[in-house]
């Protein structure tokens, strides 16, 4: 049986810090024992390899414990955004075919609201402060039933995950990945200057996002320490990075904007001399922000990556290239290949824009329970897949994203899919038509904007419409600005010409992201 990396670290470095939460330090020996107790306790509940296991909650030691336990016993880990409404949670849990839900007590009331509809779920386990509802199991009780020996499964240390992302219909889809591609992971480690046994990671972003989750998990695979910040706070980030000599993190540009916007006395407390790899992703990093980071924080640690939940990390932008290649997200690494293809299905000349296709061993297996799959093209041996982004490549191989997959909005590093919001607005009795898209925002990169057409002879009460949306959508999905029009532009066949509306707000900009 292959040795699990956490078991190896617990044996080799039993007293090394695995997780730090506030003043509480959990060593690798204690962390691995808890992981094993949880995994064995879940096995005792007749949960089996291949079962889907949804987890939900802000960043915590328990979340990290469960992620590793699920991997060790072969369950498919399904992150669920704690900012979802109960209705949104119910859809993901049911669609994923989950048999287990593990939830922070802070969010357990949402699961209770829809529990009677979750017919496939056999167990709900609650961790954290607060009582468990009737029929829910307490985390400590599950641990008490499991021994701390390694689960008897032939695991390789890389478990399957299914992360939900949305598509053209607006309904979330589960992107299932079972491939690990260890050679490519080693190449990425080298690109990002990660050192086995010497990494200290801070959870700048929420772990239910693929990037923060991957970086925290990779740090543990390397025998490093994960410093847990439950939710992002720039002042606390400064203190934790300085106190724990943090070496790497993964973040969206919004968090970086909040850090560099801190008053001088706060930035004076920040010591980044230990930082080797601060990775920005989830949205393009504005050139002005890069300049500000270099001026205020330093010029040796800022990396940018381009990728997706479906295709993993595809390009890396190194610190030394950030200012000399404005607008680029870097170059492919480790044997990953890219191809820019025109509307005619033929590769375009260097420097010309087209659809970006990627050939990578980290591509997802497919979407769960849907016929919708990634674009694929059979050129140069096949294996090329695309999430729909439009890009160009320069003479040095640097990639520039010109426009984004379909109409997706990225606000504060979070993917938001307009079709889902439009579907809610269409449910309002006074709404005839609706178009939702992202418009420029200095704080968030983009904000959600809605254009609404009233039904003939009716007027729309603004406060009532906002209340209607707030009851059906998570806070980050709700429109931040509204516009009313007598008619929305559509083709003769009825297709909404959303780009005509969107372009009014992006006129004069080099890119539309």
Image (spheres, rainbow, N blue to C red):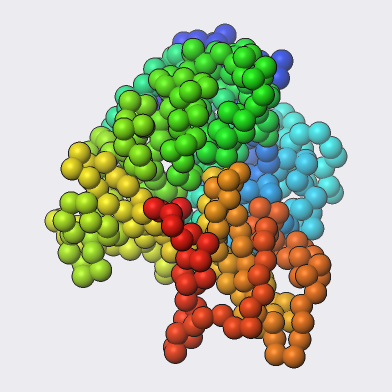
- Indicate left or right for 201 with 235 as reference: left
Q: Residue at x 78, y 70 (%)?
A: 462
- Indicate left or right for 107 with 314 as reference: right
Depth order, front residue of 113/136: 113
Q: Looking at the image, is 257 positioned above or below residue 178?
A: above
Q: Looking at the image, is 26 positioned above or below residue 136?
A: above
Where residue 506 appears, as percent x and y from the top left, is 48, 59
Depth order, front residue of 509/314: 509
- The number of callouts visible is 0
- Residue 88's image quarter? bottom right
Question: Can see residue 511?
Answer: yes
- Residue 474's image quarter? bottom right
Where residue 457 appears, as percent x and y from the top left, is 74, 91
Q: Residue at x 17, y 64 (%)?
A: 346
Single out the residue that lies furthest toward the front.
Answer: 508
Q: Residue at x 42, y 48 (%)?
A: 308
- Indicate left or right for 371 with 20 as reference: left
Q: Residue at x 43, y 27 (%)?
A: 302
Where residue 252 appears, as percent x and y from the top left, is 53, 39
Q: Quadrant of the N terminus?
A: top left
Q: Looking at the image, is 270 positioned above or below residue 475?
A: above
Depth order, front residue of 253/178: 253
Question: Can see residue 154?
Answer: no
Where residue 388 appears, as percent x and y from the top left, is 37, 60
- Residue 356's image quarter? bottom left
């Amino acid at each position: 049986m292959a040795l699990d990396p956490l078991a190896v670290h617990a044996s080799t470095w039993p007293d090394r810090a695995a997780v730090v939460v506030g003043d509480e330090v959990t060593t690798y020996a204690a962390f691995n024992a808890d992981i094993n107790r949880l995994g064995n306790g879940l096995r005792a509940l007749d949960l089996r390899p291949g079962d889907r296991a949804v987890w939900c909650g802000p960043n915590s030691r328990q979340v990290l414990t469960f992620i590793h336990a699920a991997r060790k016993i072969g369950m498919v880990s399904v992150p669920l955004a704690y900012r979802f409404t109960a209705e949104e949670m119910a859809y993901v849990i049911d669609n994923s075919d989950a048999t287990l839900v593990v939830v922070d007590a802070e969010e357990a009331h949402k699961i209770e609201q829809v529990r009677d509809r979750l017919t496939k779920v056999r167990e709900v386990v609650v961790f954290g402060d607060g009582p468990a509802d009737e029929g829910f199991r307490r985390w400590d009780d599950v641990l008490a039933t499991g021994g701390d020996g390694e689960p008897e499964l032939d695991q390789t240390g890389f478990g399957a995950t299914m992360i939900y992302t949305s598509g053209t219909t607006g309904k979330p889809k589960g992107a299932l990945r079972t491939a690990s591609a260890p050679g490519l992971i080693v190449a990425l480690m080298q690109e990002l200057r990660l050192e086995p046994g010497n990494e200290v990671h801070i959870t700048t972003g929420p772990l239910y996002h693929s990037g923060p989750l991957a970086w925290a998990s990779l740090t543990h695979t390397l025998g490093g320490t994960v410093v847990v910040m439950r939710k992002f706070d720039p002042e606390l980030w400064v203190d934790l990075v300085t106190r724990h000599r943090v070496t790497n993190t993964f973040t969206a540009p919004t968090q970086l904007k909040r850090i560099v916007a801190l008053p001088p006395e706060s930035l004076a407390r920040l010591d980044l001399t230990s930082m080797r790899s601060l990775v920005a992703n989830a949205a393009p990093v504005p050139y002005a922000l890069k300049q500000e980071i270099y001026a205020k924080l330093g010029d040796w640690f800022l990396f940018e990556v381009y990728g997706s939940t479906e295709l993993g990390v595809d390009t890396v932008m190194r610190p030394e290239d950030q200012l000399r290649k404005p607008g680029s997200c870097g170059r492919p690494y480790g044997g990953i290949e890219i191809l820019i293809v025109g509307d005619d299905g033929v590769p375009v000349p260097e420097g010309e824009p087209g659809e970006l296709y990627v050939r990578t061993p980290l591509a997802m297996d497919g979407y769960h329970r849907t016929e919708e799959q990634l674009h694929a093209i059979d050129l140069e041996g096949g294996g090329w897949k695309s999430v729909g982004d439009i890009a160009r490549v320069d003479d040095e191989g640097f990639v520039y994203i010109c426009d984004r997959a379909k109409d997706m909005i990225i606000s504060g590093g979070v993917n938001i899919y307009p079709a889902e919001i439009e579907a809610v607005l269409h449910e309002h009795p006074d709404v005839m038509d609706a178009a939702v898209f992202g418009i420029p925002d200095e704080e968030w990169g983009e904000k959600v904007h809605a254009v609404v057409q009233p039904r003939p002879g009716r007027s729309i009460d603004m406060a009532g419409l906002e209340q209607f949306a707030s009851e059906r959508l998570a806070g980050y999905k709700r429109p931040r600005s509204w516009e009313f029009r007598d008619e929305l532009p559509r083709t003769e066949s009825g297709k909404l010409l959303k780009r005509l509306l969107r372009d009014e707000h992006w006129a004069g900009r080099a890119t539309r992201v």
